[in-house]
């Protein structure tokens, strides 16, 4: 006699997800599918046989859809249905306003992935025709067959962390853009300046020198030699505090002093390019100040959540690195498992096999790109200081027969970091190197 059901852990979790969705997308309710727009909302009321029961177009904002929900409830009652379940794509922030209206009215609410709608649009009748009315029906079809998900309902603190994380991500991109502009402009107009330091854009003395030159030279660095070496050094020393420095590195200053006489580069571009460098450096300094303020606010939120000491117990993971990751995941208690967090980041292995065929396994790249980027960046900082991660990376890049490239191994370490963070946050237990390395089972450590 056969023992057990043969269900895998994944089967059981999927069954739980389906049960949770079915509790919201009930068969005794109609599905109100809404294609959200800026000033035009297209709604289709459907039953679970994918029949369209009613349609409505409202030229209002998303937060003004309350009358449409009331209309849908009235129409559903005509067909003997007990209320509606609202479904939409997660478009911008409009879906959050609609979710608030649905919750206030006691309706169910689900979201349908935009990618799923795109795929369904082509598979519906093998064309790529796109209209708001058609998309509303596709959203309804996907919701009725449970190809949807229950969106995150973040509380005030977690929502604040998410908004700050989005702002930080943009500021980091702006800061990187400033660095690239400075390097590109100098390479065109005054390439000799870039060779005065091994890593010029990371040198405070070099930055102070460039700020002095671009502020005074009016497109001709050579004319600053008239002020004399001593006065030039004094000017750099006065500029240094604006960049967070205290001591002048004289070797770099001397090299830049010699580079003032260099006439290399495109002469016609020099005046405009150096003026632009000066303006971009001001933008960069302003961006750094805003970035520091945003990070301070994120650390404050992390303290409010009582997570600072827990997340920093992971060797090599800074508080701001953890805050950036948590800003993208939200409250990790909403995930069923650590693997769900890894899949949410798109760092899970995507297997390619059939029968005896075994294709190349890559990471899926599905999920939140910013979460994937946050975990990837955190690994670069944690790897030199975390012995478990360092050993994992060394093993993956040196094992016989299935050796990974360094980038692939770092992706595996990023996934491991997310799993550790999930365990620390959900169990409210500090990180334990013995558990992370597999030398001590988690159940024994928690019992102790």
Image: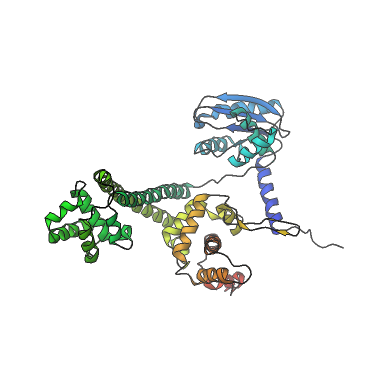
Give coordinates of residue 55: x percent, y percent: 63, 25
Please say if 223 is above or below 54. below
Figure colour scheme: rainbow
Judged left or right of residue 81, residue 425 is left
For this view, does 110 lie left or right of residue 218? Answer: right
Residue 162: where, in percent of width, then height? 46, 48
Q: Is residue 361 above or below residue 171?
A: below
- Can residue 435 be seen in the rendering of this structure? no
Q: Residue at x 42, y 53 (%)?
A: 301
Kindly indicate the quadrant of the structure image that contains residue 445. Answer: bottom right
* Numbered label tally: 0
In front here: 221 or 174?
A: 221
Residue at coordinates 19% horizontally, 58% vertically from top-left? 236
Left or right: where 67 falls relative to 319: right
Name the residue rendered at 52%, 52% in the picture. 329
The percent coordinates of residue 180 (x first, y second) are 36, 51
Q: Position of residue 341 (x, y in %)?
A: 57, 55
Q: Is residue 217 visible?
A: yes
The residue closer to the viewer here, 62 or 282, is 282
Q: Residue at x 24, y 54 (%)?
A: 210
Figure quadrant of the C terminus: bottom right
The answer to whether residue 233 is above or below residue 447 is: above
Pick the front one: 392 or 71: 392
Q: Quadrant of the N terminus?
A: bottom right
């Amino acid at each position: 006699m056969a023992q057990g059901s043969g269900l895998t852990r994944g089967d059981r979790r999927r069954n739980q997800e389906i049960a949770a969705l079915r509790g919201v997308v009930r068969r005794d309710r109609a599905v109100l599918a809404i294609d959200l727009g800026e000033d035009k909302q297209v709604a289709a009321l459907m039953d679970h046989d994918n029949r369209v029961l009613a349609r409505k177009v409202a030229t209002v904002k998303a937060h003004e859809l309350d009358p449409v929900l009331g209309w849908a409830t009235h129409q559903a009652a005509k067909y003997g249905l007990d209320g509606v379940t609202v479904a939409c794509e997660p478009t911008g922030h409009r879906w959050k306003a609609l979710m608030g209206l649905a919750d206030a009215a006691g309706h169910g609410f689900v979201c349908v992935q935009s990618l799923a709608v795109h795929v369904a649009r082509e598979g519906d009748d093998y064309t790529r025709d796109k209209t708001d009315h058609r998309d509303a029906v596709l959203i309804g079809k996907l919701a009725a067959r449970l190809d949807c998900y229950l969106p995150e309902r973040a509380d005030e603190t977690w929502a604040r962390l998410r908004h700050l994380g989005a702002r930080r991500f943009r500021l980091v991109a702006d800061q990187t853009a400033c660095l690239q502009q400075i390097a590109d402009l100098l390479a065109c107009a005054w390439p000799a300046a870039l060779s005065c330091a091994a890593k010029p854009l990371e040198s405070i003395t070099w930055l102070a020198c460039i700020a002095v030159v671009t502020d005074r030279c009016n497109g001709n660095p050579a004319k600053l030699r008239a002020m004399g070496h001593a006065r030039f050094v004094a000017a750099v020393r006065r500029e240094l505090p604006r960049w967070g420095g205290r001591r002048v590195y004289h070797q770099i200053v001397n090299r830049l002093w010699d580079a003032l006489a260099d006439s290399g580069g495109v002469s016609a571009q020099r005046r405009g390019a150096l003026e632009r460098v000066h303006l971009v450096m001001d933008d960069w300094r302003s961006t750094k100040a805003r970035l520091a303020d945003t990070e301070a606010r994120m650390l404050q939120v992390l303290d409010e959540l009582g997570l600072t000491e827990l997340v920093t117990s992971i060797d090599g993971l800074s508080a701001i690195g953890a805050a950036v990751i948590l800003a993208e995941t939200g409250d990790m208690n909403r995930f069923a498992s650590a693997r769900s967090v890894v899949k949410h980041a798109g760092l899970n292995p995507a297997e390619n096999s059939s029968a005896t065929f075994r294709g190349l396994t890559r990471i899926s790249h599905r999920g939140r790109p910013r979460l994937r980027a946050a975990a990837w960046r955190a690994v670069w900082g944690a790897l030199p200081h975390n012995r478990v991660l360092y050993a994992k990376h060394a093993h993956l890049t040196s094992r016989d027969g299935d050796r990974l490239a360094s980038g692939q191994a770092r992706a595996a370490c990023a996934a491991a970091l997310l799993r550790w963070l999930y365990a620390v946050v959900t169990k409210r237990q500090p990180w334990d190197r013995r558990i992370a390395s597999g030398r001590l089972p988690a159940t024994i450590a928690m019992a102790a």
